[in-house]
């Protein structure tokens, strides 16, 4: 049994290494502490409503659930609802599936669970993927949309945040494959700015961190409450275990 467990662990390790080596651009680490920052979540909700909710639905989330991140219903109605929907309605879009297919080639995916649905062995979490994806768009005139992405090569969606980030091109170089010197590989070397955006690079990275924080919260809004409850449950079980142990000792002390 021990050997079987070791073999399984070794296989998972090799799988993670293979995915990291051959799975494309490495994912950056999302600053997870922002998921508990109400100001970051509120800013992320604003970015989501303004830049994502035009095409992508979050049909499993209702607008009024954002009261949990410190927003009043009036603030939600005035600043985050642009479609005439009621505050208690799901976050849907008016884009029809037919128009979406005609314009984009496919229906834009629902984003309610996007921060949980993307993961890869040895590469990171879904939040890491989205954080990397939204920061690695670059201009590519060989594509129909004029855009490409390091985390999602040949992406069909143009950069929805290009006005904030600006435009950049990716610099690649051909190098010898370390595993096969007879072959060459296309290696990413960095970005080169084309036009500036309305934000600096640092401001844009912070904004994307806030947006991903909101997406992470939206995918599992009860996570923080569940963790807090879990701590109290463990404390209760620990105290109860001590009480049960002492009761057991007291009950059996006169029995030989």
Image (cartoon, rainbow, N blue to C red):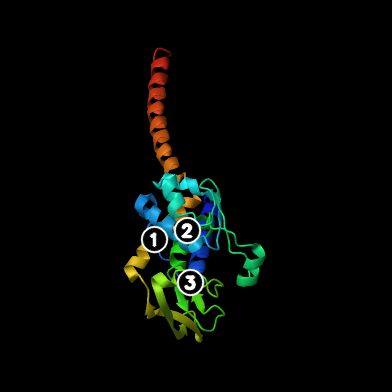
* Structural crowding at the residue carrying mark 2, measured as other residues with C-alpha within 10 Å and reported as few (<14), some (14–19) or many (≥20): some
Residue at image x 37%, y 67%?
204
Q: Is 236 positioned to the left or the right of 120 in the image?
A: left
Residue that numbered label 1 is attached to: 209
Local SS, label 3: loop
Q: Are marks 1 and 3 in contact (CB under 8 Å)?
A: no
Relative height, residue 221 to residue 57 (above, below): above
The spot of residue 28 in percent (x, y) is: 41, 65
Disc with the residue nearer the chain's start (1 vs 3): 3
Where is residue 13 drawn, in percent x and y?
A: 49, 61
> Which residue is denoted by mark 3 in the rendering?
159
Foreground residue, 36 or 200? 200
- Residue at (64% x, 67% y) in the render: 99
**Mark pair 3, 2: CA separation:** 16 Å
The kind of secondary structure element at disc 1 is: helix
The reply to whether callout 1 and callout 2 are in contact (CB within 8 Å) is no
Of callouts 1 and 2, which one flags the residue occurring earlier in the amino acid sequence? 2
Helix or strand or loop: what does disc 2 sit on?
A: helix
Q: Residue at x 40, y 75 (%)?
A: 166
Residue under label 2: 49
Between the C-alphas of marks 1 and 3, the distance is 16 Å
Confirm or deny contact between disc 3 and disc 2 (CB under 8 A): no
Q: Tell me if residue 174 can be seen.
A: yes
Q: Nearer the viewer, residue 59 or 182?
A: 59
Residue at 54% x, 51% y is 85
Task: Pinpoint residue 66: horizontal percent, then vertical percent.
Answer: 45, 48
Image location of residue 119, percent across then percent down: 51, 60
As drawn, 16 above or below 76? below
């Amino acid at each position: 049994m021990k050997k079987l467990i070791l073999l399984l662990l070794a296989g998972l390790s090799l799988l993670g290494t293979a995915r990291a080596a051959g799975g494309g651009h490495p994912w950056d680490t999302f600053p997870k502490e922002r998921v508990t920052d109400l100001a970051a979540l509120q800013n992320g909700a604003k970015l989501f409503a303004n830049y994502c909710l035009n095409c992508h639905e979050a049909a499993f989330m209702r607008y009024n659930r954002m009261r949990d991140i410190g927003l009043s219903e009036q603030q939600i109605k005035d600043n985050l609802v642009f479609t005439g929907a009621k505050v208690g309605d799901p976050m849907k879009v008016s884009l029809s599936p037919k128009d979406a297919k005609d314009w984009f080639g496919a229906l834009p995916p629902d984003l309610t669970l996007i921060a949980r649905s993307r993961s890869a062995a040895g590469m990171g979490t879904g939040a890491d993927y989205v954080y990397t994806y939204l920061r690695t768009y670059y201009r590519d005139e060989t594509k129909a949309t004029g855009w490409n992405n390091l985390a999602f090569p040949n992406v069909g969606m143009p950069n929805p945040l290009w006005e904030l980030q600006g435009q950049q091109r990716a610099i690649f170089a051909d190098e010898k494959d370390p595993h096969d010197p007879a072959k060459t590989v296309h290696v990413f070397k960095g970005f080169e700015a084309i036009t500036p955006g309305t934000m600096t690079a640092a401001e844009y990275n912070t904004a994307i961190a806030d947006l991903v924080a909101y997406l992470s919260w939206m995918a599992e809004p009860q996570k923080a409450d569940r963790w807090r409850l879990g701590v109290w449950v463990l404390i209760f079980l620990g105290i109860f275990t001590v009480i049960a142990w002492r009761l057991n000792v007291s009950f059996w002390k006169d029995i030989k």
